[in-house]
C-alpha cells in the first residue's frame, strides 16, 4: 500500500449510507460496503462501490450498534468474487468533523482485520460518519491489527466535499497576500481549497493561465504536466514565456514552473512540473495522486484517458476548449465558441456530450495524427484545428476556473452547473442539454479503479519531442549561450535571492530535474 491513503465515493453512495446510518431515533448504526482500489504513484485510494445492508439478525441497535460475524463473511465473500475489499461503517450521530476511535470501536474493527484480509486480499477499511456536519473519517487495518489513518475522504458530487484529517494534512496558514481572497469565501473554505492537490494537464495558453491562477489563489500543491516545448509560434499565447525560452529549447513545464513559483501565495507552495505524457502509465499514475484535474489538451487520446479516469477513479476532471471558425485564406473570423464541463459520475462524459470522437482515439494512439502523409489522406474532421487567440483562450481558462470555484466552493449552495457553451458571434451563454447514454462505456465503469479499461501505453511522439529537445540543448551554441547567461548575471545572484523584508527566499519543491539557468541566473 502507498504512503498516503484516502477514500472516495459518489454523491449517490454517500446519500445511501447517510440514509441508513443516521437514524430518526438518534441511535448509532452500522453497515458494510465494498470498495475497489485505485493505486497512484504515491497515494492509494479506496473507492466505495456497493452498500451492503444487514439482513435481519445480522446487526443490533442498542445505543451502540453491533453486528455478527456472518454479516462480515457474507459481504467479504461477495467482495472477493468481484476482486474488491470491504468497508465497515458506523455513525456518531452527535459528532462533528474527523472522528477518532473509541476503545470499543477500535476493538470491533481490529478483531476482523485478519479475517477480512484473508478472504479478500485487501485491508479492512473502517469509516465513521459524524452526524452533525456529515464529515467522514477513515482508516485501513493491517493484517496484524494496526490502524493506518487516511488523509482524506472525498464525496464526488455536484459539489466536491472533502473531509481532511488535520493531523496528516494540517490547515495551512493564511497569508497577508490572500486577504482579499479569504474575504470572498472565508478562512475555512480557503483552508480546504489550499489543501487540494490539483493537476493541470497541458501547459498551453489555457493550462498555463489556469495553473497560474490556482497558484495565486493559494493552493499549496499545483502540478502541471506536458511533454511539449516552447517555440516562437507559441509566444502569442504563452503569456510569460520569452524568445529566450524558445531559443534555449525549454519545455513548457519548465517555464510554467518558473511562473507558478513567482505567482504562488501559499506559505509553503509545492510546484511540481512533469515533463511527460498522461497517456503513459507513469503519467497516469501521477494523475491518480490528485484531488482535481484540469484537462487542457486538444488531442483525442489524452482526453480519453482523463475522461476514463474521472469515472473509474472518482477524480473530477474539468475539461474545456475553444473552436475558432475562420474564413478561408485569413479573410476574417466567422465565429468562435468555447465549452467547459466537469466530468464526474452524474454528468455526461466527453463522448456523451459530443466532445470526444472515440474513433479518433486509436488513430491518435497510433501516432497517425502526427504523420503528415496520413493527414493529407484523412478526413478533415480529424485534423487538429490550429487557430487560437490569446485574448480568447483567456475566456476558456476563466470559464474553467468558474467551474472549479462552483465545484469546490459552491456559491449559493449550487455546485457546478453542467456543460456550458459560449458563442462569440451572438454573445450567448448556453447550458447544454446533453445527458448520459444508457450504455456509456465510461459511465458504466464508475469506481472501477485499478480494474479500469486500459487506455494508456507508450507515447512515441512524446518521447521523440523530449529526446529532440534534449539533443538540441547539447549543441555547442546552446552550451555557450547558457554559459554567457551565467556569466552576465552571476555577480547579482545574492541580491536577487535576498530582500530586506524577507531575507533568503525559501525554496519551492518541484519534481522537475532540469538545471537550465534562467534570465536571472537562478537554477530552478
Image: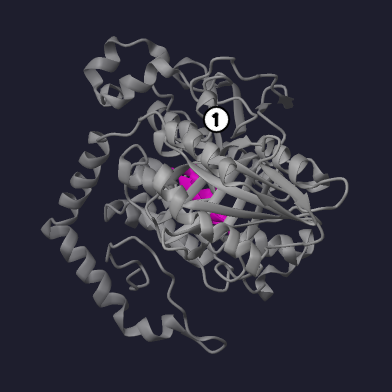
Q: Residues within 10 Å of mark 1 (few under 14, many from 20)?
A: many
Give percent across and percent down for residue 2: 39, 57
Horizontal side, residue 323 vs residue 513: left or right: right
* Residue 118 colored in magenta in the image: no
Of 344 and 338, nearer the camera is: 344
Which residue occupies the extreme left position in the image?
Answer: 476
Answer with the quarter of the image where residue 70 lies: top right
Residue 276: x and y in percent read 32, 46
Image quarter (top left, top right, bottom left or bottom right) of the C terminus: bottom left
Q: Is residue 66 above or below residue 377?
A: below
Q: Is residue 225 visible?
A: no
Q: Which residue is mark 1?
A: 322
Measured as percent of width and height from the top left, residue 250 is found at: 30, 54
Q: Quadrant of residue 171?
A: bottom right
Q: Which residues are magenta?
A: 195-214
| Whether residue 418 can be seen here | yes
Residue nearest the observer in this picture, 369 or 2: 2
What is the image's colouring?
A: one colour
Please check the rendered image and state whether residue 201 is part of the magenta-colored stretch, yes or no: yes
Side (left or right) of 373 relative to 136: left
Element assignment for label 1? strand
Q: Is residue 89 above or below residue 481?
A: above
Q: Name above or below for residue 202 compared with residue 370.
A: below
Give the answer, above or below, for where 287 lies relative to 302. below
Residue at the (62%, 46%) spot, across then down:
68
User: Whole-percent x and y of residue 35?
Assistant: 52, 41
**On-image quarter of the N terminus:** bottom left
Q: How many marks?
A: 1
Amino acid at each position: 500500500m502507498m504512503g498516503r491513503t484516502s477514500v472516495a465515493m459518489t454523491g449517490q453512495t454517500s446519500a445511501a449510507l447517510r440514509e441508513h446510518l443516521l437514524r430518526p431515533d438518534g441511535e448509532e448504526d452500522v453497515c458494510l460496503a465494498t470498495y475497489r482500489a485505485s493505486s497512484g504513484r504515491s497515494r492509494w485510494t479506496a473507492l466505495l462501490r456497493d452498500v451492503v445492508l444487514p439482513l435481519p439478525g445480522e446487526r443490533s441497535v442498542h445505543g451502540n450498534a453491533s453486528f455478527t460475524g456472518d454479516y462480515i463473511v457474507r459481504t467479504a465473500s461477495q467482495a472477493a468474487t468481484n476482486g474488491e475489499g470491504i468497508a465497515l461503517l458506523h455513525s456518531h450521530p452527535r459528532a462533528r468533523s474527523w472522528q477518532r476511535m473509541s476503545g470499543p470501536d477500535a476493538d470491533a474493527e481490529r478483531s476482523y482485520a485478519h479475517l477480512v484480509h484473508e478472504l479478500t486480499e485487501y485491508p479492512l477499511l473502517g469509516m465513521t460518519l459524524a452526524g452533525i456536519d456529515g464529515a467522514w473519517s477513515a482508516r485501513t487495518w493491517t493484517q496484524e491489527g494496526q490502524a493506518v489513518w487516511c488523509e482524506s475522504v472525498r464525496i464526488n458530487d455536484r459539489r466536491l466535499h472533502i473531509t481532511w484529517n488535520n493531523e496528516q494534512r494540517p490547515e495551512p496558514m493564511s497569508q497577508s497576500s490572500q486577504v482579499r481572497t479569504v474575504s470572498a469565501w472565508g478562512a475555512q473554505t480557503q483552508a480546504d481549497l489550499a489543501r487540494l492537490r490539483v493537476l493541470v494537464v497541458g501547459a498551453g495558453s489555457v493550462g498555463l493561465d489556469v495553473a497560474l491562477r490556482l497558484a495565486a489563489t493559494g493552493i499549496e500543491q499545483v502540478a502541471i504536466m506536458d511533454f511539449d516545448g516552447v517555440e516562437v509560434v507559441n509566444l502569442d499565447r504563452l503569456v510569460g514565456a520569452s524568445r529566450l525560452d524558445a531559443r534555449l529549447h525549454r519545455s513548457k513545464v519548465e517555464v510554467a514552473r518558473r511562473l507558478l513559483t513567482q505567482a504562488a501565495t501559499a506559505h509553503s507552495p509545492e510546484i511540481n512540473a512533469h515533463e511527460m505524457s498522461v497517456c503513459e502509465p507513469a503519467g497516469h499514475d501521477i494523475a491518480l495522486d490528485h484531488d482535481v484535474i484540469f484537462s487542457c489538451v486538444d488531442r483525442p487520446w489524452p482526453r480519453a484517458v482523463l475522461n476514463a479516469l474521472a469515472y473509474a477513479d472518482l477524480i473530477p476532471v474539468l475539461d474545456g476548449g475553444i473552436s475558432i471558425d475562420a474564413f478561408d485564406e485569413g479573410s476574417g473570423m466567422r465565429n468562435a465558441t468555447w465549452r467547459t464541463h466537469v466530468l464526474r459520475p452524474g454528468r455526461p462524459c466527453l463522448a456523451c456530450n459530443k466532445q470526444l470522437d472515440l474513433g479518433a482515439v486509436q488513430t491518435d494512439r497510433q501516432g497517425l495524427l502526427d504523420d503528415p502523409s496520413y493527414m493529407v489522406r484523412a478526413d478533415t474532421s480529424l485534423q487538429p484545428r490550429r487557430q487560437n487567440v490569446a485574448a480568447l483562450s483567456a475566456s476558456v481558462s476563466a470559464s474553467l476556473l468558474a467551474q472549479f470555484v462552483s465545484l469546490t466552493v459552491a456559491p449559493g449552495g449550487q455546485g457546478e452547473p453542467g456543460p456550458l457553451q459560449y458563442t462569440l458571434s451572438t454573445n450567448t451563454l448556453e447550458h447544454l442539454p446533453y445527458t448520459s447514454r444508457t450504455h456509456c462505456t465510461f459511465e458504466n465503469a464508475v469506481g472501477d479503479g485499478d480494474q479500469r479499461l486500459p487506455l494508456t501505453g507508450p507515447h512515441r511522439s512524446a518521447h521523440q519531442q523530449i529526446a529532440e529537445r534534449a539533443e538540441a540543448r547539447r549543441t555547442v551554441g546552446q552550451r555557450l549561450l547558457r554559459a554567457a547567461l551565467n556569466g552576465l548575471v552571476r555577480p547579482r545572484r545574492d541580491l536577487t535571492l535576498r530582500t530586506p523584508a524577507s531575507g533568503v527566499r525559501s525554496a519551492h519543491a518541484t519534481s522537475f530535474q532540469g538545471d537550465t539557468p534562467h534570465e536571472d541566473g537562478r537554477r530552478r
